[in-house]
Image: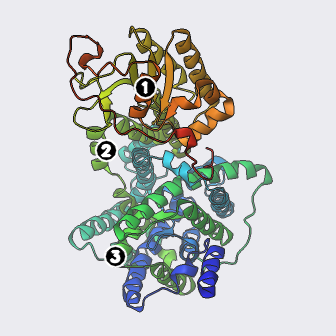
Amino acid sequence: MTGSSDRNGAAGRWRRVPAVGWVPEYRREWLRGDLVAGAVVAALAVPQALGYAAIAGAPVQAGLYAVPVALFVYAVFGSSRQLVVGPVSTVSVLSGSFLATFGVAGTADAESYTAALALSAGIVLILAGFLRIGWMAEFLSKPIVTGFVLGLTMLVILNEVPNLLGVPTPQGQVVERLSALAESLTRGQADATTTVLSAVALLLLFGGQRFAPRVPWGLVVLLLGLAVSSALDLAAEGVAVVGAVPRGLPTPMVPTVDPDDLPALFSAGAALALVGLAEGLSAARLFAGKGGYRVDADQELLAAGSANVASGLFGGIGVAGSLSKTAAVDDARGRSQMAGVAAGVLALVVIVALAPALSSLPRAVLSAIVVNAVWKLMDFAALGRYARVRRNDIVSALIAAVGVLVFGPLNGLLIAVGASVLGLVYRSSRLRVDTMGKVTGEKAAWGSLRAHPERPTYPGVMVLRIDAPIFWVTAQPVHDAVLAQVEATPGLRALVLDLEATNQADTTSLDALAELHRALRARGVDLYLVRVMWPVRRALKRTGLMAEIGEDHLWHSISQGVREARQTHGLTGYPAVQGGVFDSDWLPVEVDDLGEEGEEHIVSDEPGPEPAEI
């Protein structure tokens, strides 16, 4: 008993460090698959890290430093068994756009500001994890993420085209850059050697992945590019190369930035955190579903935040969960975060022993690797599916994509999220109030008369169902719709209102309910509430509205509420009839059966500890 208690206590103390749980339970038979998966991830991550550092406007070593640090830290704090965390395209593009905003892109301060962005993103994520607000990531729906990534990918490719052609990199908005590129091409400014090198690299990357998908073509092209560059001395021929890459491990230090930029850096960090979390959490959930395990959204916030803080302190770029590299782990039969640890060790070997050899890598080859890495992120099939399934989804995706292209990554994301929230509020306000009738042949079952007008109802008693939650947006429309239905029904003695769709109650909705009760009472109609959730009952009690309506007017089921209304108003002698109009010459359509009596009163139902308020 004591041993079990000790283990439970230890689990509680170390619940924020999942590695304490999975390392002792690690199986030896998983090791081979994890080592192979780690080698595959390293082969993908190293060349991509160089490209993503270029995208972020930082020195290439900033991308390399981020790889092992992020992998090691996530292995300790992550709740996913397979997620690979490291530099990703979306975060890198956003980070690069922020560097341009701060005016440090391409300057000596770029490395410090890039690390500061990663550090601030990590702090935001850690705070969000401790505050347990992982649910906020749900506002980034799949259509929004798809459209956002589509726009970002187009921006990435547009940014890499000048390097692929050997022409000057234009500045300005998308249209201005496209115009400048077209002008450079018409003037014949493209470098022939660079263009041929780019074409060969792209052909190997795209063609190789099609015919031999298991080969790490990014690494193959990287090595071939280095070999050709050294053999032909391409730098002397005018081909742009990466330049000096320092050897050795980075030393941890707090990045130095202008203190006046700190508020803007934390705002930018929050944006990086939001975008990175959306991509990483999506990948973690996808492979958790395939593997039959669960991930904790709040723990993922802490893990991603810790990885970003570590990357920033070691001079790396912002990181997030990578869908493509996680898929590579899954394909290689990686079973645990030991695959990430193995990849991190291999990345350290590259940093310590091989980093200077990367200095002769042509920029065109690096740009080809970047284009190949992000190309598959343009999911046009998903856009087609959104268009077929729901118009609002394709609209959200297109708003995100166009917003990124026209207004930049951050503003595009904010516009898309804002449009999504407005759409959510709009859809919530489009409520429907259904009149309910008894479902023939089913005990105590009720359904809408909208599609089944033949369902019988009880004279003098109307049952209405609100098909959306009652909150500050819908409160007045609900009040008006219910009152309109009551006024259109002569001879009504009681109204049974089904509130099952409402699980929270705010002041506005409670006030509207109180006004409705008084309006019904003035018309001689008694109000009964059924299927009322505990948080709503608690709010009714706090405001005194429950006492005003009467505790004996709240019931668990529609049938019991209707029974009480009929008994109270002397309507039990009138059977259920079709069409809602009672005629004394009609015969009952069915036995007057509302289910078994003796249901416990809803107010006497003790729910236990009060749920947290939202």
Viewer-proximal residue among 120 and 613:
613
- The quarter of the displayed image where residue 293 is located: bottom left
User: Which element is circle 3 on?
Assistant: loop
Q: Are marks 1 and 3 in contact (CB under 8 Å)?
A: no
Q: Give how far apart the Cα atoms at labels 2 and 1 are.
A: 26 Å
Q: Amino acid at mark 2?
A: Leu
Mark 3 vs mark 2: in front? 2
Question: Nearer the N terminus, badge 2 or badge 1?
Answer: 2
Q: What is the crowding at mark 3: few (fewer than 14 residues within 10 Å), some, or many (at least 20)?
A: some
Q: Are marks 2 and 1 in contact (CB under 8 Å)?
A: no
Q: What is the crowding at mark 1: few (fewer than 14 residues within 10 Å), some, or many (at least 20)?
A: few
Point 66% across, 48% down: residue: 267
Q: Name the residue tied to disc 1.
A: 430
Residue 277 visible from this viewpoint: yes
Q: Amino acid at mark 3?
A: Pro
Question: Nearer the N terminus, badge 1 or badge 3?
Answer: 3
User: Which element is circle 1 on?
Assistant: loop
Q: Amino acid at mark 1?
A: Arg
Point 69% across, 52% down: residue: 266
Q: What is the crowding at mark 2: few (fewer than 14 residues within 10 Å), some, or many (at least 20)?
A: many
Horizontal and vertical percent for residue 271? 59, 50
Q: Name the residue tied to disc 2.
A: 383
Q: Name the residue tied to disc 3.
A: 216
Q: Give how far apart the Cα atoms at labels 3 and 2 are.
A: 29 Å
Horizontal and vertical percent for residue 508? 61, 26
